[in-house]
Image: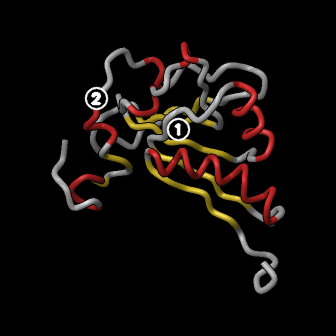
């Protein structure tokens, strides 16, 4: 920070990495102090905390976008019935594959997560978790087989 006092900060991750990015977005500013500009995007992240925690995240990080793809299973875990909640604005790509159409669902401090995007899906699909923004994450990035 001393060498680059006007640097921007980017928090991002897919799946568990998205959850860890969410925790970092809370922890890093408290440890290092604020940055000029913050970019915060997660992809296929699970729910990361209860209402009080997600309210805190949204208070600290006002420009948090979490991307969800079609019927991805992971953003539905853990369940809201267990007291978990998503923070941030959801950018949901409802069509499997390379569809570019998306819907935004805004969350507000003090209210449960907006259920009008991925939460409208009744049956989930693990394959949708491994394909984000046109990239096959299993074969293209991790070197393993697709699900």
Residue 89 x, y percent position in the rendering? 62, 36
| Residue for point 81% across, 56% down | 30
Q: Position of residue 99 (x, y in %)?
A: 34, 41
Q: Residue 86 sits in which quadrant?
A: top right
Nearer the observer, disc 1 or disc 2?
A: 2
The residue tagged 2 is 125
Residue at horizontal 81 percent and vertical 83 percent from the top: 2
| Dot 2: element | loop
Number of marks in the image? 2
Quadrant the C terminus occupies: top left
The N terminus: image quadrant: bottom right
- Which of the marked residues, 1 or 2, is nearer the chain's N terminus? 1
Side (left or right) of 123 relative to 9: left
Residue 40, image x, y percentages: 63, 53
Provide residue 93's location: percent of width, then percent of height. 42, 36
Q: Is residue 73 left or right of residue 105?
A: left
Q: In which quarter of the image is residue 109?
A: top right
Dot 1 corresponds to which residue?
91
Closest to the observer, 90 or 42: 42
Q: Tell me the number on the disc at residue 47.
A: none
Q: Measuring 27% from the left and 59% from the top, which residue is drawn there?
A: 142
Residue drawn at the location 54% of the way across and 32% of the way down: 47
Pointers 1 and 2 in contact (C-beta within 8 Å): no
Q: Distance between the residues labelled 1 and 2?
A: 18 Å
Q: Judge left or right: residue 35 versus residue 143.
A: right
What is the crowding at mark 1: few (fewer than 14 residues within 10 Å), some, or many (at least 20)? many
Q: Name the element at disc 1.
A: strand
Q: Which residue lies furthest to the left in this view?
A: 145
Q: How crowded is mark 2: few (under 14 residues within 10 Å), some or many (20 or more)?
A: some
């Amino acid at each position: 920070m001393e060498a680059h006092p006007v640097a921007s900060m980017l928090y991002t991750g897919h799946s568990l990495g998205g959850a860890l990015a969410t925790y970092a977005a809370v922890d890093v500013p408290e440890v290092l102090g604020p940055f000029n500009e913050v970019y915060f995007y997660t992809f296929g992240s699970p729910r990361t905390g209860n209402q009080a925690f997600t309210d805190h995240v949204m208070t600290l990080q006002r420009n948090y976008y979490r991307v969800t793809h079609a019927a991805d299973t992971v953003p539905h875990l853990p369940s809201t019935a267990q007291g978990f909640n998503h923070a941030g604005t959801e950018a949901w790509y409802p069509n499997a594959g390379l569809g570019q159409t998306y819907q935004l669902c805004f969350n507000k401090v003090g209210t449960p997560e907006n259920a009008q995007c991925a939460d409208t899906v009744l049956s989930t699909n693990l394959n949708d978790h491994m394909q984000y923004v046109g990239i096959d994450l299993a074969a293209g990035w991790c070197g393993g087989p697709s699900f």
